[in-house]
Image (tube, rainbow, N blue to C red):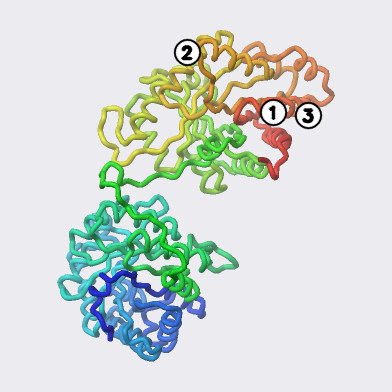
Amino acid sequence: MPARPFRERLAADTPILTDGAMGTTLHQHGIPIDACFDELNLSRPELIKSIHVSFLAAGAELLKTNTFGANRYKLARFGLEAQVSAINAAGVTLARQAATEAGRPETYIAGSVGPLGVRLRPYGRVSPEDARAAFREQITALAGVGVDAILLETFTDRLEILEALAAAREAAPELPVIANMTFAEDDRTLLGDLPVRVARDLHAAGADVIGVNCGGGPAQIARILAAMRQAVPEAACAAVPNAGFPEAVGGRMMYPATAAYFADYARTFHARGARIIGGCCGTTPEHIAAMRQAMDSAASPLPDLSITEPVNDELLTVQEQPTELTRKLASGQFVVTVEMHPPRSYTAQKLLAAAELLQSAGADLVDVADSPTARMRMSPWAVCHLLHTRLGIETVLHFPTRGRNLLRIQGDLLAAHALGLRNLFVVMGDPTHIGDYPNAMDNYDVTPSGLIKLIKQQMNRGVDQAGNSIGQPTAFTVGCALNMGAQDLDHEIKVTRRKIEAGADFALGQPVFDPADIERFHRRYREVTGEDFTLPVLMGVLPLYGARHAHFLHNEIPGITIPEAILRRIETADDAPAEGVRIARELLLAIRGMVQGAYLIPAFGHYELVAEVIDALGVPGRP
């Protein structure tokens, strides 16, 4: 038995190191992933005990019992609901025997209690009372054979873990309780709760230790640990990460984080005040041994990661990671994006194939237009979501103000953010009278500059247009339209300055066919404003498809002027599309040092020609 009570050891200077992943290790021993791991306490006790011994040999001070799913609801799936007491008691006994046989009788044994595997009301059919009864049944069995603490782990529902915590207090009021939640990739629980809310509720409900386990890798757990400690500085905390996000390799789930990486983070967790440190899914005895060595090492002082600033509720929120576009603009990389039009049907296979072509050619992003030329097409939200989820390519969602009132605009913005679409191109949009439905509603409540201001200065600060809280600030990166070749440059500069003052992060430029247009804009901007123009611009580059196409653009599209020399090249070319590609490549290389990226616009859906234009940048290896 442990020489010191668990609560006394918890208050010591050094954190307690737990073991690693029982489930992962069982799977490595050939146990099917869909088997009842908890039942192995009865049918394969020597295997369970040997795994405990391996983690003790690695340096673990605390063993988690193999009882994570040993509640009546989960066991019922295997016809074992009558075995709750027997399976839990065996789990504790095996852990205690392993500690004795390893010569480590001082090891702490924590009775592992996981979620019930069913939803509680109002999101499911199980009442809170029935849930608490199930937890109480399991915890009573664990406490009856002498665990040192109750470990509530891998909960995704804040209300469910509070029921489990209440059950622990009823069934075994003398036992310490460790309460660990799991968070999704956005640092929220699956039902949307932030670490701050979880930490405060668990602490107020009487948990001895509050913490985070499973979820992502050590970097995410360190981030959430900091938020929890800032919310409840006096609480003891736990940090028990997975070995990174799992990857399917050869039909098996593999975890990428190395033992050395875990060792580094063990010191980070210690520095951030964690009292319990360990590993969850994917962590092996090698990971635990590396953490043990790092925690015991006195070769170098811990990094100073203590939190000294006062708690501010407004700041205790999830900090959204910047988009790839934001990172590349900030680092000065030359960005290439390609415009795509949604299909005129509900099938998107051809569009996805074209996007895959562009991705392999070296495009950084895809711009998805919204009803271009006022033609009926699939929603760009759906297209962006498909591109992101199927191909992993980042998108810029075109977001016109025309045809939307303020109510719909703000709802659409929240929907876009929920789908992970955080790069927006705000534009007026094409008038409906030129499209399929000329009598469709065409009015609007806000101009592009006004919408940019609403997004950047209100929604990105957590409030809507009326000043009401939206719960969590959005994190949009917003682009605006720019025509550097406009006839009235002074007017274009005036409008552009309004967009910059509203908070625009970048601009998509109208196609140019003469780099001198860019120089002329910069010169006039400096004359009018007395300042240099610094807004990042992704300049439009449009490969000409033929003479008729070139003359149409030159004569009928406002703001596009094609020099006579280029018109002659297209008119006299033996292969006009190929000549258009050559012209576009020359323009792309010529403007590369003058703007921060290219906005490639395919003619008539010829994405293969755009891919040839991107080749001018030398992909792969494009800087």
* Residue 165 screen position, x and y as percent: 21, 66
Kind of residue sitting beneath label 1: Leu
Nearer the observer: mark 2 or 3; the answer is 2
Label 3: element kind? helix
* Residue 61 screen position, x and y as percent: 36, 78
Position of 388 with respect to 597 (left or right) is: left
Quadrant for residue 542, please give it.
Answer: top right
Residue wearing tag 2: 494
Position of 75 with respect to 607 (left or right) is: left
Is 191 placed above or below 497 here?
below
The quadrant the N terminus occupies is bottom left
Kind of residue sitting beneath label 2: Lys
Residue wearing tag 1: 588
Is 92 placed above or below 198 here?
below
For image coordinates 51% across by 17% down, the residue present is 531
For image coordinates 31% across by 74% down, the residue present is 112
